[in-house]
Amino acid sequence: MSTIVDLTILGLVAGMTYALMSEGLWGAALQFFNALFASLIAFNFYEPLAQMVVDNVSVAANYADSLSMMLLFIVSLLLLRLATESLAPSMVRFPTPVYHAGRFIFAVGGALITIAMVLLAYQASPVQKKMLGVMDYKYTPFYKERFDRDFLAFFQYTTGYTFARNGVGPGGDSEFPNKPILFDPKADWLLNHQAKRPYGTEAILEDAPGEAAAAGAAPAGGAPAGGPPQASGPQRPGPGIPGGTAGAAAGLAPTNP
């Protein structure tokens, strides 16, 4: 089953890469940067939008995080696409080797960002603790790359350096000496979202098999939206569907469990 999931993800990346390559080097480059900035916009603002959904549209509270994330990503991508098509030159000529190498590189980059956003939106939705029966926070596919995890690490980096927020974050990290307000300094976004997904009884931590009972299936309604996570033993938050209060982290596991 894990091989099928891995091949399906690779197939989606390959298909999207082929579609972007057909736009040539200039079009693929524009789409790469459009997808990159759209993903940064989505992750910067999906949490407050999800909280608004929880407060005003209770019927969609369980899906607030994933819906907000994808809505912001798609709308931002469409607006950026319209802007670049209107402002950018319609034809830019490049030497043949540069043209073919460049359109492939930018097409792969745009496809990876888009697939990563789809996977992260699925991670934030109320599904099985092991998505599709195989993918949890520590899962590694046979090609050794986790596109969703790589994007979370990249986004944390942008909040620590490139687009650092003003102020001092809690705790801080030796990698960020000025202690900016990071997107989850404990790097447990995937872990928290797995713990809050309502279906399945898998242990959240590999070395804590007894935690399966504490992190088991939650009621269909999940935990109260916007409320604080419930502790599950000494390690992680307990079950419950995140209603707009998604964790803010990037990476595989917490540095301070």
Image (spheres, rainbow, N blue to C red):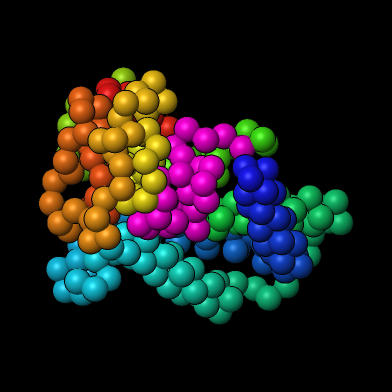
Query: Does 29 appear in magenta?
Result: no
Q: Residue furthest right?
A: 96
Residue 3 visible, this angle: yes
The quadrant in which residue 214 appears is top left
Identified at 37% across, 25% down, the residue is 209
The percent coordinates of residue 83 (x first, y second) are 50, 75
Percent of width and height locating residue 111? 62, 56
Q: In the shown orientation, is residue 100 left or right of residue 210?
A: right
Q: Residue at x 19, y 53 (%)?
A: 223
Residue 124 belongs to the span the image colors magenta: yes
Q: Main secondary structure of the magenta part?
A: loop
Look at the image and tell me in which quarter the C terminus lies: top left
Q: Quadrant of residue 208?
A: top left
Q: Give above or below for 80 relative to 33.
A: below
* Along the viewing direction, whichever of 47 and 1 lies nearer the viewer: 1
Q: In this picture, is 130 found above or below 39?
A: above
Task: Give the percent coordinates (x, y) of residue 42.
Answer: 38, 59
Q: Is residue 229 left or right of residue 76?
A: left
Magenta segment: 117-141
